[in-house]
């Protein structure tokens, strides 16, 4: 039994709890925000993990949601998601004071120490929330690291962008739109979109990342990429990391049923020391080294 448990490091770390909805916000593009009072799970959350939410009492199948922020001290966790199916649409109807069942935290997170001096965080669409969590972690735990957060979206961002006061060499001078919360934390950010939003880079967020790497003057040995977003974006991130010779950790997005490693419905092909293998995104990931993922 002890050997079996050792081979399943996620066992014993996942909790099941009834959470109370503390706050709800709705944004353009069918984007929704929840703050949940869930102390037993919030205390264990780390950047890159996710929770499995029951969206409605009449819908037994849960939905995986990335954790955007969590406070172990105050017992809350935040999720930001896009409603694109029946379950997430039901979740969007939740109101303050309601209760919902939460399973988590689940998954292998981003590495939590040993950072290079210039972490480059790239978030696309619903892949933005884990980047915010990681940025907050870096701010608190890695004083010597100077992260840059780049975010891309083709629907309006779920916050009101403001002109940045934090200069970023290597970014075009007219690209000034930033996330206010990150600005308040002293962490520079820039936004990219093909939708023509004011102050944003006109193009893909990975193109903006490439421009920064190639023209900022920052040594390649000082850069490491962390990314989450849709599969085409992560494929581009893996190619960028390979072309520029920098390491990258990526958080994959996959449909999930059980989310705890039992059904193997979220497997992806990765290269290992012993050859190609199928790994479960839910518990073997969602974070993988980009160079190992076979897209």
Image (cartoon, grey):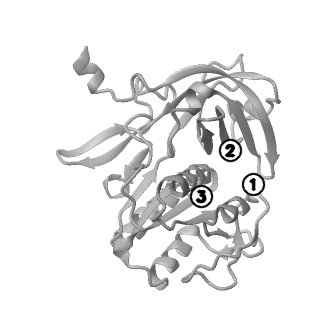
The residue that appears at 74% across and 42% down in the rendered structure is: 33
Dot 1, crowdedness within 10 Å: few (<14), some or many (≥20)? many
> How far apart, in angstroms, are the residues tagged by discs 1 and 3?
12 Å
Residue 235: x and y in percent read: 44, 60
Is the residue 285 above or below the residue 174 in the image? above
Side (left or right) of 50 relative to 86: left
Q: Which label belongs to residue 158? A: 1
Residue at the disc numbered 3: 124
Dot 2, crowdedness within 10 Å: few (<14), some or many (≥20)? many
Residue 160: x and y in percent read: 79, 61
Sequence-first tag of 3 and 2: 2
- CB-based contact (under 8 Å), mark 1 and mark 2: yes
Dot 3, crowdedness within 10 Å: few (<14), some or many (≥20)? many
Q: Quadrant of residue 92?
A: top right
Residue at the disc numbered 2: 80
> How far apart, in angstroms, are the residues tagged by discs 3 and 2?
13 Å
The quarter of the image holding the N terminus is top left
Residue situated furthest left in the rendering: 274
Is the residue 151 above or below the residue 17 in the image? below
């Amino acid at each position: 039994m002890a050997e079996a448990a050792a081979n399943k490091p996620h066992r014993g770390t996942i909790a099941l709890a009834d959470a109370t909805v503390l706050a709800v916000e709705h944004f353009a593009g069918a984007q929704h925000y929840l703050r949940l009072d869930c102390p037993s799970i919030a205390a264990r959350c780390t950047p890159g993990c996710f929770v499995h939410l029951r969206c409605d009492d009449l819908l037994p199948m849960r939905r995986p949601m990335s954790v955007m922020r969590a406070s172990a001290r105050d017992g809350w966790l935040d999720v930001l998601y896009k409603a694109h199916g029946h379950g997430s649409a039901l979740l969007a109807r939740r109101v303050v004071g309601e209760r919902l069942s939460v399973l988590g935290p689940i998954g292998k997170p981003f590495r939590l120490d040993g950072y290079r001096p210039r972490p480059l965080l790239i978030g696309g669409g619903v892949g933005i929330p884990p980047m915010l969590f990681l940025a907050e972690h870096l701010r608190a735990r890695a004083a010597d690291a100077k992260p840059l957060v780049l975010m891309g979206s083709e629907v309006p961002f779920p916050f009101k962008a403001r002109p940045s006061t934090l200069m970023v060499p290597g970014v075009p001078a007219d690209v000034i739109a930033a996330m206010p919360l990150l600005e308040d934390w002293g962490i520079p950010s820039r936004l990219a979109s093909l939708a023509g939003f004011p102050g944003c880079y006109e193009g893909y967020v990975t193109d903006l990342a490439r421009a920064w790497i190639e023209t900022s003057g920052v040594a390649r040995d000082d850069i490491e990429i962390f990314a989450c977003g849709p599969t085409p974006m992560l494929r581009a991130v893996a190619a960028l990391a390979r072309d520029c010779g920098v390491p990258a950790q990526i958080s994959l997005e996959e449909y999930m049923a059980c989310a705890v490693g039992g059904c193997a419905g979220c497997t992806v092909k990765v290269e290992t020391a012993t050859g190609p293998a199928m790994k479960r995104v839910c518990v073997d990931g969602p974070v993988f080294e980009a160079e190992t993922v076979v897209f």
